[in-house]
Image (cartoon, helix red, strand yellow):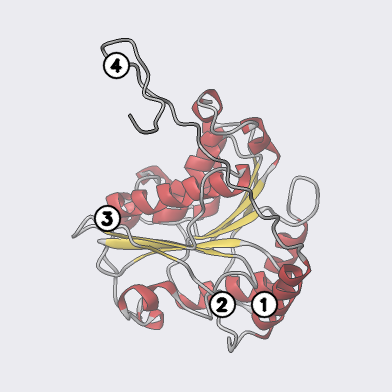
Amino acid sequence: MALKRMGIVDNYEAIRTYTVAVVGVGGVGSVTAEMLTRCGIGKLILFDYDKVELANMNRLFFQPHQAGMSKVEAAAKTLQFINPDVEFDTYNYNITTVDNFQHFMDTIKTGSLKGGPVDLILSCVDNFEARMAINTACNELNQVWIESGVSENAVSGHIQLVVPGETACFACAPPLVVASNIDEKTLKREGVCAASLPTTMGIVAGFLVQNTLKYLLKFGTVSHYLGYNALQDFFPTMQMKPNSQCDDSFCRQRQKEYQVREAAKPPPEPVEKQEEEVIHEDNEWGEQDVGGEA
């Protein structure tokens, strides 16, 4: 792999040992799943309750002959052709119902290749309720996840890393509220079809997978928040600190646990500043200037 050849990642092969759950297999989620499959991820768990429609054909992934199939089934069949070494689990249900939410929690706790918790959850859903369900589950399970979204006008998007207790959760500060004062609850209105551009979705999916690789393989910096504004080619980043008064009790609990861990860390050792050796260039007479008065 190029990352290994360039010395950026020591052990890229470790990607085969990781399990990632993708919630929402629409415009962003399907492309995200495809990129991870091509990257050689060990296992993908796909969640979506919707079916493929002809109206989805402006997306980058689905094909007309798949209309009527569940999105998770259509995605898994296509992805298996791309990389048969990847293991797939698919769940065709809405995670926001009581019974399905509990099954979602159980799957996150035991769905990895080794039978334990998944390594990362990627939220690619398009409504407030599903985002809050993922947020609630991840705070309770102490599960790291990355939220993503595309705005209703289709020309901006974002990703947000959520590390329970360390960074802001979705209830602390929904990213679109932070970025543009848009109320997340209004983004999926009954009878309103949000605009979509495969270009914006592809860019957001690329950011999402790039940061997934950085998180799993431990290289580079994973931004707490990374935005994209197509109108201005603007890519804002910001730190997202948790809200100590967050409405989610598990978020507040994780914050206390994080503070205890940080307090228990030994103080960093002082670094001695070494004097830099002054290198004197030779002049045209073959002499060196060693300083001092003439």
In the displayed structure, would residue 188 be above or below residue 58? below
| Distance from the alpha carbon under mark 2 to that under mark 4 | 59 Å
Say whether marks 1 and 2 touch (CB < 8 Å). Answer: yes
Secondary structure under the numbered disc 2 in the rendered image = loop
- Checking the image for residue 283, the label placed there is 4
Of badges 2 and 4, nearer the viewer stands 4
Residue 203 visible in the displayed image: yes
- Checking the image for residue 197, the label placed there is 3
Which mark is first along the chain, 1 or 3?
3
The residue where tag 2 is placed is 242
Q: Is 31 left or right of 191, judged from the image as shown?
A: right
193 or 265: nearer the viewer: 265
* Residue visible at 50% across and 50% down in the picture: 211
The quarter in which the C terminus is drawn is top left
| Distance from the alpha carbon under mark 3 to that under mark 2 | 32 Å
Which mark is first along the chain, 4 or 2?
2
98 or 248: nearer the viewer: 248
Quadrant of the rendered image containing residue 247: bottom right
The residue where tag 1 is placed is 255
Callout count: 4
Residue 30: x percent and y percent?
46, 50
Q: Which amino acid does label 2 sit on?
A: Pro
| Distance from the alpha carbon under mark 3 to that under mark 1 | 37 Å
Secondary structure under the numbered disc 4 in the rendered image = loop
Secondary structure under the numbered disc 1 in the rendered image = helix
Q: What residue type is labelled 1?
A: Gln
